Amino acid sequence: MNKQELFEKVIEYFSKSMPKPETELHYKNPFHLLVAVILSAQCTDKRVNIITPALFKRFPTPESMAKSSEKEIFELIKSCSYPNNKAHNILGMAQMLHNDFKDIMPDNIDELQKLPGVGRKTANVIASVIFNKPAFAVDTHVFRVAARIGLSTNAKNPLQTEQQLINYFPAEIIPDAHHWLILHGRYVCKARKPLCEQCGIKDLCNYYILQSKN
């Protein structure tokens, strides 16, 4: 099976098994999602969803958060990982979004990355989820799953994985494919012990095929 055929079979499987994939982060608007994604770095979505209701109640808009302080934000997010750094970035992001972008979320990857705390992965999430653009956010799940299945080959970093994936996934599929690989990695293709026997694409998977031979 060549790589194009592999991608076609993976798309066929997930299109049927996960026809409407969505982020598990809770949000009501682009600003909320951006805050949640920043908080989710090295932290579970479950924990972020526990934190954000009180945070968004106190700061529903970029303007309200921009007028806050790192200390006040820290107190509301201190149960997540790296709260000091995240409080600093979230305040800076809100201030720039309010002052420079007039509270309107940019839809451009480069513009998004100007915001404090927003790297390429986070910018891609916003572009994909909010603006339905063919931007492929590569987190640890996507990086791992793509390599195991064989969707990416010898990728040394997330950017290389991203470049390989967007070469084969059709642009209109990419927003869904991003969630397919994340959710598959979170619940089936787990880091320490993948649940191969529960996997509907194990017969396509390089990792499973190699393990079966050993």
Image (cartoon, grey):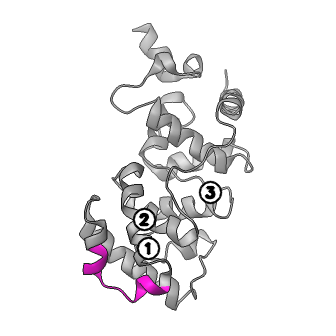
Of 79 and 95, the residue lying toward us: 79
Q: CA distance from mark 1 to mark 3?
A: 30 Å
| For residue 185, above or below residue 93 | above
User: Which span is picked out in magenta?
Assistant: 63-74
From the image, tell me which residue sits under label 3. Answer: 135
Closer to the camera: disc 3 or disc 2? 2
Question: The residue tagged with tag 3: helix, strand or loop?
Answer: loop
Query: Percent position (x, y) of residue 110?
Result: 56, 72
Q: Earlier in the sequence, mark 1 or mark 3?
A: 1
| For residue 107, above or below residue 206 | below
- Residue type at mark 2 is Pro
Question: The residue tagged with tag 2: helix, strand or loop?
Answer: helix
| For residue 46, above or below residue 104 | above
Left or right: 196, with 179 as reference point: left
Q: What residue sits 25% from the left and 80% below the top?
A: 71
Q: Residues within 10 Å of mark 2 (few under 14, many from 20)?
A: some
The answer to whether mark 2 and mark 1 are in CB contact below 8 A is yes
Where is residue 133, by image quadrant? bottom right
Mark number for residue 53?
A: 2
Of 99 and 209, the residue lying toward us: 99
How many marks on residues? 3
Query: Percent position (x, y) of residue 42?
Result: 33, 53
From the image, tell me which residue sits under label 1. Answer: 57
